[in-house]
Amino acid sequence: MLSVITVILKVILKPAGTVALAPAVLTAAGFTAGGIAAGSVASWMMSTAAVANGGGVAAGSAVAVLQSVGAAGLSGVATTAMASLGGVVGGAIAEAIAQNSTA
């Protein structure tokens, strides 16, 4: 019974954790409300993208999207997508744990 409760809690908590941590992870990577932080992973990504694109960052690229989210936060659609992804990953992890505990 305990493993069933554990699986249920992990499936519920993983999406919430994914959505809650996304802004903190983006900020830590350097995608901030004030722009891309100097010397950060984000600045390296931006530099690499700019060199690959002849001097500019392409609209809709990963760097552009991450900066937008870092500056403005997650939209409703993005929040739903993050929660869904977290749920899928959390469910897979919980299933693997449940299978290992019964083996």
Image (spheres, rainbow, N blue to C red):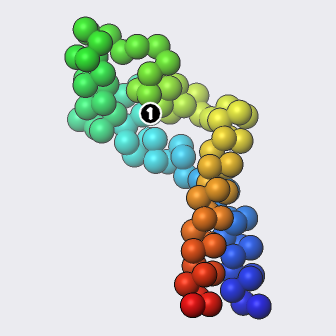
Give the residue displayed 71% in from the left and 41% down from the top: 80
Q: Residues within 10 Å of mark 1 (few under 14, many from 20)?
A: many
Residue tagged by mark 1? 32
- Whole-percent x and y of residue 82? 63, 45
- Whole-percent x and y of residue 49? 30, 22
Q: Residue 101 vs residue 76: left or right?
A: left
- Vertical placement of residue 64 versus 4, above or below: above
Give the residue displayed 23% in from the left and 35% down from the top: 39
- Vertical placement of residue 4 versus 8, above or below: below
- Whole-percent x and y of residue 41? 30, 38
> Outermost residue, front direction?
103
- Whole-percent x and y of residue 101? 58, 88
Residue 54 visible? The answer is yes
Give the residue displayed 73% in from the left and 64% down from the top: 12
Which quadrant holds the N terminus? bottom right
Residue 54 figure quarter:
top left
Three-letter amino acid code at disc 1?
Thr
Q: Residue 1 vs residue 96: left or right?
A: right
